Every structure is written in C-alpha cells, then in structure tokens.
C-alpha cells in the first residue's frame, strides 16, 4: 500500500485565520486532507497502542508560523513519516490507524452522517443487487462480511472474495480498484465521477482454490456468474465448439459442469485490463494485458494483423514501481514530486502533483500512470519494462496479490478466512473514535489554492520476495 503527500492547501478557520493542510493520497488516489496536529494526535495514539520505540520519529513542532520553505520541508517530512509508518504491518492492521483514515475521508468529503445508516447497493457479477443500510463510515471489510452474511456465504469463504469499484461504460464494466479497509465504500463511491458500482468478485489467483469454493452452493453461484461474464466479454478464450458446449450447459443450469469446462480454457481466472501501451518490444506499442496464473500476459497486434503473445512471470520480476505524472492546474507543463514506498514485497515509486491524481480512475483530468517492473529476461539479462495505463495501480495490486498468495502457499499457510486480523473500527462511532484521536474535524472550509510542490524524496528499492526462491529450472 502506497502513501504520499504530494501537495498542501491553505484552509480557513471559522474565525478567519488560516492554516496549512496536507493532502494524503493512497495507491495513487486522493484520500483525505489532514492538519499537522491531526497526524500528531494519530502518532501519539499509535505510540500508546504499539510502543513509541518501534515507530518512526514524528516531525517536530515549530513555535513560529512556517515560511513557504519550511512548509515544503514539513510536507516532505510528513510524507516520509507516513511512508515509513505504512511499512509496518502492525500499523496497517491497527484499528486506530484505519479508523483515522476512514474518519479523515468522511470529514474531507463532507459525507457526514456519522453513525446514521445510509443505503448502499452491492452487485453480484450476475447483475443481482443487494441493498443494505449501513453507517456511512463503515469500512470495507465490515461491509464485505455483512454482504456475505446476507447472501449466506460461509464465514470460511468470505475472504476468498472482495469488493471492487467498477465503472459502467456503455455496455462494459471496467474494474477500477479493489476497495481497501482504510476506506468507506459508501464515501469512495460517492466521490468518483461517472456511473460506478460496488461489485463482489473473486479475490484469489490460484485456480485450485475453486474446488473448495464450488462445494458451497453460494460460492458456486458466485464463481459461475463471474465466469459466465468473463466468457461473454471475451476474457476467456473460446472457439465455436466450446461456445456451443458452454451454452448447452448454461441452458441446463449445469453450473459445476460449466465451471469445470471453463477451468480448462485459456485465460480462465485472469483479470483483463483496458488496452494500453508499453515500451516492449519498442516504445509506444499497443498492448492488451491480463493478470493471472502468476503472470502478466501481453498480447500485441502486429502490422500484418497477427497477434504475438508474451508472459511475464511474477517470480522473475525483481521489483516494480508505480509512477504518476499530471499537469498542474493553470500550467501548461508537467511538474512532479516523487516518493517511494513498499507495497508488501514490491518497490513502489510514486510521482504526483495534484490532489486530483485520482482523476485517472474517476474521469477527471488526464494523467499518465506507469507500471514499471524489472524482469529477468534470461540468466544474465535484467531489463525494465514500462506499461502506461490508467489501471497501472490495479495491475500493481494484482501483482502484489499473486506474490502474497505464492508466499503464503510456500509457507504452508492458508488464505485469511475470518475477521480475526481486520480492523474492528467499523462499528465504532465517530464520537468514541474522537476520544482516542483528538480534534477529528479536519476541514473547516474547502481549500483556497493548492500549494505547488518541488520536493523529491529519495527512491528506495524493496525486493520481490517471490523472486528470491526462484530456482535455475525456472529460467
């Protein structure tokens, strides 16, 4: 998970005085705006919960008002602090940390409501809709559990699925992102432009897990509906004879048999992205990318109309990073700030310059997002491959999911099957949370102007742990 603070903004108190607030972006998307004292309060509470000696040092207070140079220095310091903080798994699973992010998102977006219930629609891949009344600030994992309970999915299967934000575009559905537990799905959906749905989809890559899910009636129905959609959209490769067989099984309602046949087909279990461009084999090459089977699959159409295919195995990626470039409002040129963090076992470099960097997902201003990975082409040939796509962050999250699943399997562990490690803040009221985090009213007014940034954080490289145990037989 990647955090950055690419810029600041000047806000006003009710009495007319001004203060500087900091825009936090998570995984390339604007999330919330907070004050220095808000982050300091969070730090103090985390010290009580986790112990101060294990946390990164918090940027010190200043007695006098900050100059523009000092404000920029504090922005960079706060960004480095939250980057270091977010690399600690204990912090990411901490209820105060996740509750702070949800509350800050709520205050920033002025969703209001606190614990007041609001209706929210969650769609199955079949098109069926479940409407629940939940608190506006309910976190993703809590909503996932409520949805799965509503449709009677057994507890042990809940976290084989996840909630995704999906954009409806003409007759197609485009997967925008997987919703995370640091956000409220209700608020996240409200903040995006265009028609978006919250959809329940499969959240694993190992097709062998299918067997256990298919043994449950509800699990079977969910897998079946998603697979039918993937076949109809052309995500799973078929021919006329296979299409005939699948149609016959679908007409008979033979869901398990349909799935068994689909599981033998090419690209089953892959997530396909919109067409984008890459620099392999040459810059500006149009490419269709799918993620699955522990790889990124590239399909490139040649000048003669033929299609060439290449597979980039996740175990041969040493590291990868996300880069975001966006023009500043009122400027004809690009300007970038940079930061880097790890997303589990990845190298994740991020550049951004506006609180609207989420617009690549939300239909706002044009931004360029790049996924770059260092790949072992042959025994002594490491090469960087760069993909330019509005779904670059989603690609990165897919890679991370495959790596985590691979490592989990190697260590003999199982996929999380209950809410034991989740943040329990979901049902916690804002009033109770404010007792632990002081001064939760983050924004007293909408921003006047965003301050431009010119700072650069030194990049760091974090290894892909799955790369380490690759043997010579993989080459």
Image: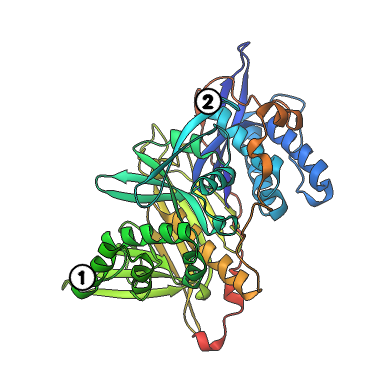
Crowding around mark 1 (Cα neighbors within 10 Å: few <14, some 14 to 19, many 20+) is few
Query: Which numbered circle lies on residue 244?
Result: 1
What x and y, as percent, mark residue 329? 40, 33
> Earlier along the polypeptide chain: callout 1 or callout 2?
2
Residue at image point 62% right, 38% down: 101
State the count of labels.
2
Kind of element beneath mark 2: loop
What x and y, as percent, mark residue 431? 69, 26
> Horizontally, is 228 left or right of 459 in the view?
left
Question: Of residues 454 and 393, which is closer to you in this image?
Answer: 393
What x and y, as percent, mark residue 206? 49, 70
In the image, residue 208 above or below residue 223: below
Toward the bottom, the furthest residue is: 473
Residue at image point 35% right, 75% down: 310
Question: Of residues 368 and 67, which is closer to you in this image?
Answer: 368
Question: Of residues 159 and 188, which is closer to you in this image?
Answer: 159
In the image, residue 413 above or below residue 447: below
Query: Which numbered circle lies on residue 110?
Result: 2
Residue 276 visible? The answer is no
Residue at image point 24% right, 68% down: 248
In the image, residue 201 above or below residue 399: above
Q: For residue 404, what is the image quadrant?
A: bottom right
Toward the top, the furthest residue is: 15
Q: How is the image coloured?
A: rainbow
Task: Calculate the distance from the C-alpha at mark 1 to the C-alpha at mark 2.
Answer: 52 Å
Asked if the residue under mark 2 is in contact with the one under mark 1, i.e. CB atoms within 8 Å, the reply is: no
What x and y, as percent, mark residue 371? 44, 59
Q: For residue 183, what is the image quadrant?
A: top right
Residue 245 visible? The answer is yes
In the image, residue 348 above or below residue 91: below
Kind of element beneath mark 1: helix
Nearer to us of marks 1 and 2 is 1
């Amino acid at each position: 998970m990647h955090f950055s603070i690419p810029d600041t903004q000047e806000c006003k108190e009710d009495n007319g005085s001004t203060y500087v607030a900091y825009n936090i972006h998570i995984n390339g998307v604007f999330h919330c705006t907070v004050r220095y004292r808000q982050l300091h309060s969070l730090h103090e509470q985390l010290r009580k919960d986790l112990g101060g000696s294990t946390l990164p040092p918090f940027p010190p207070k200043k007695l006098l008002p900050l100059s523009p140079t000092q404000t920029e220095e504090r922005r960079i310091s706060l960004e480095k602090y939250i980057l270091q903080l977010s690399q600690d798994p204990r912090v990411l699973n901490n209820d105060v940390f996740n509750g702070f992010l949800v509350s800050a998102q709520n205050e920033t977006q002025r969703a209001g409501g606190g614990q007041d219930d609001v209706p929210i629609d969650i769609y199955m891949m079949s098109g069926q809709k479940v409407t629940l009344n939940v608190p506006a600030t309910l976190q993703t994992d809590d909503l996932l559990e409520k949805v799965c309970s509503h449709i009677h999915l057994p507890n042990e299967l809940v976290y084989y699925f996840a909630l995704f934000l999906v954009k409806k575009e003409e007759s197609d559905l485009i997967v925008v992102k997987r919703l995370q537990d640091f956000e409220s799905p209700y608020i996240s959906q409200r903040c995006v432009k265009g028609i978006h749905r919250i959809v329940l989809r499969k959240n694993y890559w190992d097709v062998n897990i299918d067997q256990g899910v298919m043994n449950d009636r509800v699990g079977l129905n969910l897998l079946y509906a998603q697979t039918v959609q993937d076949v109809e959209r052309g995500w799973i490769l078929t021919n006329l004879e296979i299409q005939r067989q699948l149609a016959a099984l679908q007409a008979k309602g033979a869901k398990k048999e349909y799935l068994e046949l689909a599981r033998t087909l090419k690209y089953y279990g892959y997530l396909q992205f919109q067409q984008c461009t890459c620099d392999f084999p040459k810059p500006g090459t149009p490419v269709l990318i799918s993620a699955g089977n522990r790889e990124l699959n590239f399909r490139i159409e040649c000048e003669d109309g033929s299609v060439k295919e290449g597979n980039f195995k996740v175990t041969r990626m040493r590291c990868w990073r996300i880069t975001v470039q966006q023009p500043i409002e009122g400027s004809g040129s690009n300007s970038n700030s940079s930061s880097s963090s790890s997303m589990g076992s990845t190298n994740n470099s991020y550049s951004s310059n506006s609180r609207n960097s989420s617009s690549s997902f939300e239909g706002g201003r044009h931004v360029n997002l790049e996924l770059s990975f260092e790949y072992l082409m042959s025994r002594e040939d490491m090469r960087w491959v760069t993909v330019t796509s509005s779904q670059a962050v989603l690609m990165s999250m897919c890679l991370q999911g495959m790596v985590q699943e691979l490592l989990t399997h190697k260590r003999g562990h199982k996929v999380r099957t209950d809410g034991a490690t989740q943040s329990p803040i979901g049902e916690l009221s804002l009033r109770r949370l404010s007792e632990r985090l002081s001064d939760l009213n983050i924004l007293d007014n909408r921003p006047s102007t965003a301050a431009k940034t010119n700072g650069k954080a030194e990049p760091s490289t974090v290894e892909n742990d799955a790369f380490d145990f690759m043997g010579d037989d993989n080459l």
